[in-house]
């Protein structure tokens, strides 16, 4: 099948390159329109109580969005400043689409106790369409920023989403400017030639264009999170380089045995292309676990990232072969080892050491990984606030200014309790008694809204505990709770309920694909266990840094007491798929060596010696890409970037170089075992490249 694909892609290479060129134009033209459609509303989960209550309120009591301005850095009682603020308030009230702007000098709580800061809240009219809302936001925010004071910042509400989208776009540009030159330099070191080094970057640019286009298309039918841009772009760029690197290394090896470039391309696609195909499928399957969750954010992320992976895979299997047909003749073959020289000598020594000392390796490596994973047991998640943004962002500066001048809890979103018609007064009184200063307002039709402002943060432990307490006190009354804290509680419950099903879905798909790749039943199980070790170790370090605050300052962040609710599911899904990537690189070489020699132990050594350099280079390149995206300073992306970087490096070094040969040696020939009916099924239906025929007595069992 892959040989047929290679012949199709290479028969008309110029046509293939032209089609991909049009795809690039579409991606960087139409696709970049997604930056204007990004949403920061992550924790909504359809069907949950918080979502139901929010929709009920929207229908009965539609209210517009709101933004907040803060003026600080000078005494606000100054006559000149007061005149400026009052004039600005009057001008903002005249902006089309603005519903209300209270006078901060006449409204209690709007001026700080030290007299050096004031808050200007702006409420928009309900029912504005997107264009009208954006015009209103721009006009109101710009007028407030014209106030002559040392510190003037405007953010919050939909304006926060726009600011985060702009920040995401800038971060992507900066990351690309950093990562692409570094990746090119590393590829020059690996290949020693500019032509070979440039080809992976061509595929990588296709991956970036695919990321933009996939997100734009999904934005037509669902919300796209601000986190999606960095995540899909970093993965699209990294995997494209990985796949192209694997194909190019194999192409140079094939050039050692044939001078016919076209034949070398066909052999490359038939062998390495098989690994790329299965790798892309396993990464995509790992992400399908996100589809089990009803969260719009997780589902859209799963679909978008899986689409980018498929685009990278198709580029490696079609665009790269077409490029090799046109330019591959100028790429030198891989160096042939001299007499007595062993290919991949370092990795062969590592593999032999791990195989000989298999028990010792397992006794040392496994406990170390488990210790790194210990912080996961205390992991908590939160929606987060502007503290997740870099210190130079306007939203972060606004929050820091408010925190410096106003009492704790100022501006914190309340826990919103919706008492529908039929709720008795005694129940309402018990709910109001849960928080001092609870405010009640009537709803059309006989219902009421009770707002309780929690101590601490909007999604902190006190706020979520208050949500749980309200749900206990209400009994059977028709009362629902919504707001930031309630959405977080419902999101956590959703994760806990659906996570086992997501894990089963992913594991079942991975086991089937790995069986189709290897023909073994035990290898998929061994792969899953070792992968989970590296994954939980990486996640444990992320918890230790970003939740507990250890060494967070080195990354320009701070300990927030919880991880962003976006980070753990995305780290787990993506890192699991990437780990399968490197596992397949190594297993493919082991399987080839075993089919040729029939020696199980030597196949492990040969497989690692031939794939170790590729896996190490691929992991290093991917780590560079992830690290480049960590320069933006946005905490959720820092968390995801660090988690994926560590997962890749731990998996490609400690796990694949030590645990894999040790466990393979421990299993011996049983590693490739499968029941006879499954062996026959694999022989008949399994996708495999052509291999030299071996005498029947030398064919290893289980193949």
Image: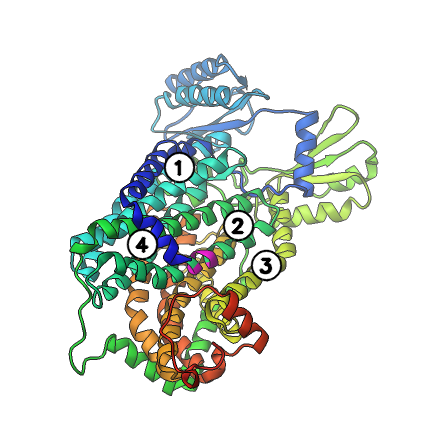
- At a point 32% along the width and 43% down the height, the residue shown is 16
- At a point 33% along the width and 41% down the height, the residue shown is 20
Asked which secondary structure carries label 3, the reply is helix
Q: Alpha-carbon neighbours of circle 3 within 10 Å: few (<14), some, or many (≥20)?
A: some
Q: Alpha-carbon neighbours of circle 4 within 10 Å: few (<14), some, or many (≥20)?
A: many
Q: Quadrant of residue 415?
A: top right
Mark with earlier residue (4, 2): 4
Which residue position is annotated with label 1?
A: 397
- Give the Cα distance between marks 4 and 1: 38 Å
Q: Alpha-carbon neighbours of circle 1 within 10 Å: few (<14), some, or many (≥20)?
A: many
| Marker disc for residue 505 | 3
Asked which secondary structure carries label 2, the reply is loop
Pointer 1 with pointer 3, Cβ within 8 A: no
Comparing labels 4 and 1, the label whose residue is closer to the camera:
4
Mark with earlier residue (1, 2): 1
- Give the Cα distance between marks 4 and 2: 29 Å
- Give the Cα distance between marks 3 and 2: 21 Å
- Residue 317 is situated, as x and y percent measured from the top left of the image, at 36, 53
Assign the N terminus to one quadrant of the image.
Answer: bottom left
Q: Which residues are magenta?
A: 278-282
Which residue position is annotated with label 2?
A: 565
Between 281 and 175, the residue placed more toward the observer is 281
Magenta segment main secondary structure: helix
Asked which secondary structure carries label 4, the reply is helix
Whether residue 699 is situated above or below residue 150 in the rendered picture: below
473 horizontally vs 342: left or right: right
Mark with earlier residue (4, 1): 4
Which residue position is annotated with label 4?
A: 241
């Amino acid at each position: 099948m892959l040989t047929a694909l290679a012949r199709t892609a290479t028969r008309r290479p110029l046509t293939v390159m032209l089609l991909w060129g049009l795809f690039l134009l579409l991606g960087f033209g139409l696709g970049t329109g997604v930056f204007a459609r990004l949403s920061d509303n992550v924790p909504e989960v359809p069907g949950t109580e918080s979502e139901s209550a929010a929709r009920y309120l929207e229908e009965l009591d539609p209210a517009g969005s709101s933004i907040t301005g803060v003026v600080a850095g000078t005494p606000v009682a100054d006559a000149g400043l007061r005149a400026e603020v009052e004039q600005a308030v009057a001008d903002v009230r005249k902006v089309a689409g603005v519903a209300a702007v209270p006078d901060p000098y006449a409204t209690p709580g709007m001026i700080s106790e030290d007299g050096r800061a004031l808050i200007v809240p702006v409420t928009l009219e309900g029912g504005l369409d997107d264009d009208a809302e954006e015009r209103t936001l721009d006009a109101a925010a710009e007028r407030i920023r014209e106030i002559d004071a040392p510190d003037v910042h405007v953010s919050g509400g939909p304006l926060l989403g726009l600011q985060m989208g702009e920040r995401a776009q800038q971060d992507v540009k900066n990351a690309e400017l950093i990562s692409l030159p570094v990746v090119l330099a590393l590829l020059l070191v690996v290949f020693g030639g500019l032509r070979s080094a440039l080809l992976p970057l061509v595929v990588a640019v296709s991956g970036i264009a695919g990321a933009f286009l996939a997100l734009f298309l999904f934005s037509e039918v669902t919300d796209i999170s601000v986190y999606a841009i960095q995540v899909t772009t970093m993965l699209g760029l990294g995997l494209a380089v990985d796949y192209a690197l694997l194909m190019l290394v194999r192409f140079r090896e094939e050039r050692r045995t044939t001078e016919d470039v076209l034949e070398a391309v066909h052999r490359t696609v038939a062998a390495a292309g098989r690994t790329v195909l299965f790798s892309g499928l396993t990464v995509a399957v790992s992400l399908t676990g996100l589809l089990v969750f009803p969260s719009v954010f997780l589902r859209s992320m799963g679909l978008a990232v899986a689409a980018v992976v498929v685009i990278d895979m198709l580029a490696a299997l079609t665009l790269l072969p077409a490029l090799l047909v046109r330019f591959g003749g100028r790429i030198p073959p891989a160096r042939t080892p001299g007499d007595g020289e062993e290919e991949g000598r370092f990795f062969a020594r590592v593999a032999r050491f791990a195989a000989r000392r298999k028990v010792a390796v397992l006794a040392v490596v496994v406990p170390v990984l488990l210790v790194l994973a210990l912080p996961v047991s205390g992991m908590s998640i939160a929606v987060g606030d502007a503290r997740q943004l870099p210190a130079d962002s306007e939203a972060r500066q606004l929050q820091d200014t408010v925190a410096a001048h106003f009492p704790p809890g100022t501006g914190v979103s309340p826990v919103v309790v919706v008492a529908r018609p039929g709720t008795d007064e005694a129940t309402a009184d018990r709910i109001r008694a849960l928080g001092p200063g609870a405010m009640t307002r009537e709803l059309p039709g006989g219902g009421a809204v009770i707002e309780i402002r929690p101590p601490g943060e909007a999604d902190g432990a006190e706020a979520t505990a208050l949500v749980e307490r309200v749900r206990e006190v209400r009994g059977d009354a028709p009362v629902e709770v919504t707001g930031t804290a309630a959405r977080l509680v419902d999101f956590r419950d959703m994760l806990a309920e659906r996570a086992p099903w997501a894990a089963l879905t992913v594991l079942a798909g991975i086991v089937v694909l790995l069986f189709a790749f290897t023909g073994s039943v035990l290898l998929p199980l061994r792969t899953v266990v070792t992968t989970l070790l590296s994954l939980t170790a990486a996640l444990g370090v992320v918890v230790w840094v970003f939740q507990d605050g250890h060494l967070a300052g080195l990354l320009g962040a701070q300990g927030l007491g919880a991880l962003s609710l976006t980070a753990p599911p995305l780290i787990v899904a993506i890192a699991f798929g990437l780990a399968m990537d490197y596992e397949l690189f190594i297993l493919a070489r082991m399987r080839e060596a075993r089919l040729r020699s029939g020696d199980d132990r030597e196949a492990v050594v040969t497989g690692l010696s031939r794939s170790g350099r590729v896996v190490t280079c691929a992991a290093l390149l991917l780590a560079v890409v992830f690290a480049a995206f960590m320069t933006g300073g946005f905490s959720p992306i820092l968390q995801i970037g660090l988690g994926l970087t560590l997962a890749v490096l731990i998996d490609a070094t400690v796990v694949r170089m030590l645990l894999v040969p040790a466990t393979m040696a421990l299993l011996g020939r049983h590693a490739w075992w499968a029941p006879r009916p499954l062996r026959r099924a694999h022989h008949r239906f399994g996708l495999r490249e052509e291999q030299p025929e071996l005498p029947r007595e030398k064919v290893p069992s289980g193949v």
